[in-house]
Image (tube, rainbow, N blue to C red):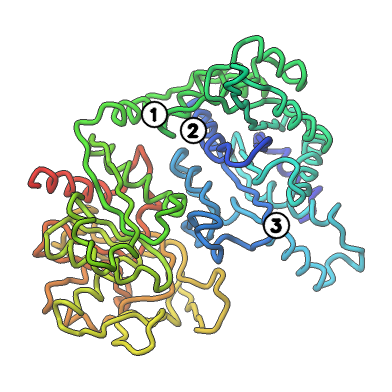
Amino acid sequence: MTIAKKIEDVLKTKAKFIFITGGVVSSLGKGLASASLASILQSRGFKVRLRKLDPYLNVDPGTMSPYQHGEVFVTDDGTEADLDLGHYERFSGVPAKRADSVTTGIIYQRVIDKERRGDYLGATIQVVPHVTNEIKDFILSDISDEDFVLCEIGGTVGDIEGQPYLEAIRQLAYELGRDRIMFLHVTLLPYIPAAGELKTKPTQHSVKQLQEYGIQPDMLLCRSQMPIPENEKRKIAQFCNVREENVIAALDVSSIYQVPISYSYEGMDAAVCKYFGLTDAKPADLSKWEHIVDVLKNPEGTVTIGVVGKYTQLLEAYKSLNEALVHGGIANKYKVKIKWIDSEKLEGEEAEAELADVSAILVPGGFGQRGTEGKIKAIKYAREHKVPFLGICFGMQMAVIETLRDVAGIKNAGTTEFMTDCEPVVGLMTEWDKDGAKQIRHKNGDLGGTMRLGAYECCLTPGSKVAAVYGSDKISERHRHRYEVNCKYEPVLNKSGMLISGRSPVGNLPEIVEIPDHPWFIGVQFHPELKSKPFAPHPLFVSFVHAAIENSRLI
């Protein structure tokens, strides 16, 4: 379908587009701003959709180091995406899809594939119009009955790799009409202690740079440590050519779940509705966010949970996990204090000392050998000391290996992921079923996008601990892994006190293990943290945190 036809089709819908850009510095919270605005608009009765356009040349973040990019978020349909999509889902409850995440790598791949097929009929391929058209095609695709489509442009205005995206949204404003498009620019108002004032000049320069690309922002979201004086708001409005009521203060708050309340209080959603002429929109109902913030500010107690991982120096690598634990705390009206423990440090003699002050232990997913033995030590401590334990993905695999080593006596139990001379308890999957079709992978194939990705069903054993936690005998969870526990070790595991309590519908892939003779010991092959939301906490985390609270009362 041509871009002209897509524009024609979108103009028949009620969809309005809000493009979110960032300036001055990176890490200002564009993703959180997009998610918060979407949630406020939802509370006014509007249907929203959120999208992320990332300027980097990787096809997706799946092969990027967590130190480079943080967490890889996975959607139901198996898309590996930026962690901002996690914010989108947690705040809006709208499941993200493949159509909601794109990178420059994907854009150029599509353009080159079309050129190779001859789709361009011999034309010289250029950034404008071919790359920009592909970006517009992404933005306009899969639109149905949404009231608002919020599109976040990654990076900072001025980055060379972001220029095609700015040109594409400039063109869309012309083609769809300015009454359908709003440009929201997130900037920084730094406070200079020596001068005792906020400085507006960086914001002015950022807007000027945006204007050089042909984009006039309609709203400025100004990150600030303190309220913006009215005279400074007027100054920003005057020099940036923005209405004064559309200069919104984005103040620092104690919890990210307070952001929608703060933005609405500052008039952000009211200004958006006024801009689009939605004068009869119902008032925002932020009661669910107010309840969440109230629980966070006034918990009945505090419980400490130890997370044993290898990326603890960069907590963005565990963003969804961190939030899921907070959600579990909210459900139990408790504050969860996370003790981040570097798994490599547990490989020495101080393992017990590091774990002695936590009420529960969680070993998350990960790749590679570094820190593995420390994770196994933490799992052994949890099993022997009856400390509540949750193992996720790699954490589940290590729990199985620990049981076979230390209970069954198979001392060389290991994983073929990085062990060549071992009892292959965990091995590479070469084929599995996905939506009725067989998926085949090879050991020496590409790394990107070749894992078992996305939502798969799991059948739970009736009467098991995990069946009681879910209150169901069939669930669907998101996966991201290449290696799997081998079912042939199930008899040995059973004799060692470990039960496979969840498996794929066909029965050949173990999905969940548990130790019935333990207060709370569960390992899952999937990533439950990806589906948890503050207003709909994941049942595994609710139960896990509850077990931690019960254990804390015994310590």
Which of discs 2 and 3 lies nearer the camera? The answer is 3
Question: Looking at the picture, which amino acid does disc 2 mark?
Answer: Ser
* Residue 329 x/y as whole percent: 27, 40
- In the rendering, which numbered label is found on residue 104? 3
Q: Is residue 499 above or below residue 194?
A: below
Q: Residues within 10 Å of mark 3 (few under 14, many from 20)?
A: many
Mark 2 — residue?
Answer: 39
Secondary structure, mark 3, is helix
- In the rendering, which numbered label is found on residue 289? 1
Q: Which residue extends farthest bottom?
A: 421
Q: Which residue extends farthest right?
A: 123
Q: Is residue 122 above or below residue 199?
A: below
Is residue 143 left or right of 157 when viewed as pictured? left
* Residue 152 x/y as whole percent: 63, 42
Q: Which of the marked residues, 1 or 3, is nearer the chain's N terminus?
A: 3
Q: Residues within 10 Å of mark 1 (few under 14, many from 20)?
A: many
Q: CA distance from mark 1 to mark 3?
A: 35 Å
- Residue in the foreground of this view, choosing between 294 and 532: 294
Q: Which residue extends farthest front?
A: 194
- Residue in the foreground of this view, choosing between 179 and 306: 306
User: Residue at image x 27%, y 52%?
Assistant: 306
Secondary structure, mark 1, is helix
Question: Looking at the picture, which amino acid does disc 3 mark?
Answer: Thr
Please report contact status of discs 1 and 2: CB closer than 8 Å, yes or no.
Answer: yes
User: Residue at image x 50%, y 54%?
Assistant: 70
Is residue 481 left or right of 201 when viewed as pictured? left
